Amino acid sequence: MGVALTGLAMAEREIRWPIGLLVLVAWGGALAIVRAKRQFLLASLLIAISIRTTVNLWTPEERPYVVSSGTTTTAVELLALDPPLLGLALLLWATKRREHRPTDVVEVLAVLFLLLTAVSALQAEDLSLSLCRFPVVARLLLIYYCFSRGVRSRRDVRLCVLALAACGIAQSCLAIVQTAGASPGVVGALVEREEQLSIIAVGSEEYGRATGTVGYTTVLAQYLGAVFPMTVAAIFLARKAFWRNVAFGGSCLVVAAILLILSRAEWIITPLSLTAMSWLGAGKFRSVRRFSRGRLAAMLLALVTVVALFWPMVAGRLTGPDEDSAASRIPSARVAVAVIAAHPFWGVGLNNYTRDMTAHGSQALLPGSPFGAHNTFLYLAAESGVLTLFVLLALLVATVRRLLSVRRADEGSLALPAVAVLCGLGALLAHSMVEEGLHVHQVLAAILWTYVGLAGALLNLQKDDAIHASRRVPGP
């Protein structure tokens, strides 16, 4: 299914419909045959999240301010993830457990986030644009529900970790192949479609920056940074030595792909993420799977070798010209702050930022280049208000506390995935300080809410284990 969806995402538009129908029929047939339908839908959803394939259902008439930035949702769309998402939601509703649990703070905050988003949409000058984005927000909350309620066992947790790791490795292989078609000194026959790349100059050379199946270079860098901890966790969760070695090699491929994408922010974030995972999971690795010091040393040596192989390109990117990076981000942040100051409570309205940014100095600060906010949190506050941003931050803090609680209480089979989710979430949020993709791009937003849902599932499993353990303790 993953190969088929990747082909669908990269195929020419003329043949996407027949390929899409073929994939959907094959997937439906597989779903009807398999017995473990819930696990099949979980894996299908995680694969489909990384595929940027859409079908437009309704598009409002074109407006000049809509095309001024790539951050405006311009249509109501069906996504590749919708069939497994709706299938999993219906299955969970039909087989829901009758059990009493205390009020879930994160669920309350998630619903409040949706309501505040709806209120901000009512303030919008262009309501049709808000209608294009509102289904996206509702879909994200459904993703949270499916993972928080659909992951019901340690086996499900392991499945999610391995599926995310496999997606990260597959995207990395595709990115390396795409880059090979445009980078100097590498055989270019592997990839012929240049539109899969964005070109950037590093010194006297030009390099192609891959987009994978997500559509944008920076989004691919953030996605790989978010799933990289999962590839590391897969090394310890895989049951056979062969698959542990595959996960080990895949982790190196992810690092190589991140280097080739030339995202300086991700170059900083990925080593910090690996360091944090090593520190938080140091005591948990040994309890999950014995891992020799020699293999750990080999992993570090391989990572250093990958960096050394690409060092001239890395050094040129780090010491080269700004290429409009800070030159666009700093003025963009100033425009966003001006919009927030003018509309602090409800913002300018959901999906209306690029419509209103010109009224707050964007043309003077960004002549000829009307970028978005380049900061997820400023973008959200400008669109939906400071209160909505506060609710999202409270939700994220609650999620981090859940993951840390699971790490402290569990011996490893839940603690290690919790550490991986925590580091992946941290990588997403750190990069979001200089990009708005987490707010406006379906792949990154879906991964965020997947991790929030997994945090809830991990906490519920840890609590269930504690309850069962207390019942086994003999009384006085």
Image (cartoon, grey):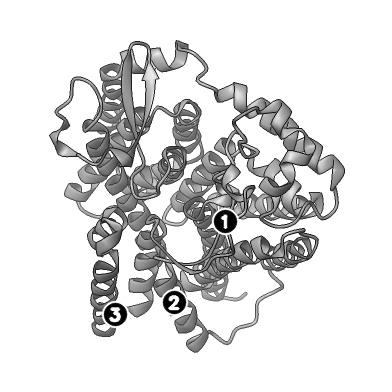
Query: Three-letter amino acid code at disc 3?
Result: Gly
Query: x and y percent of residue 150 in the render?
Result: 47, 73
Q: Which residue is mark 3?
A: 28
Between 162 and 23, the residue placed more toward the observer is 23
The span from disc 3 to disc 1 (Cα, nearest Å) is 29 Å
Disc 2 packing (10 Å; few <14; some 14–19; many ≥20): many
Query: x and y percent of residue 355 in the render?
Result: 70, 48
Earlier residue among tags 3 and 1: 3
x 79%, y 51%: residue: 347
Residue 107 numbered tag: none
Query: Three-letter amino acid code at disc 1?
Result: Thr
Q: Secondary structure at mark 1?
A: loop
Disc 1 packing (10 Å; few <14; some 14–19; many ≥20): many
Relative height, residue 454 to residue 467 (above, below): above
Query: Mark 3 near mark 1, Cβ–Cβ under 8 Å?
Result: no
Q: Which residue is mark 2?
A: 88
Query: x and y percent of residue 244 in the render?
Result: 24, 46
Q: Which residue is mark 1?
A: 73
Earlier residue among tags 2 and 3: 3
Between 244 and 343, the residue placed more toward the observer is 343
Disc 3 packing (10 Å; few <14; some 14–19; many ≥20): few
Between 93 and 25, the residue placed more toward the observer is 25
Residue 427 appears in the figure: yes
Q: Is residue 99 left or right of residue 264?
A: right
Mark nearest the camera among 2 and 3 is 3
Query: Three-letter amino acid code at disc 2?
Result: Leu
x 42%, y 17%: residue: 317
x 77%, y 52%: residue: 348
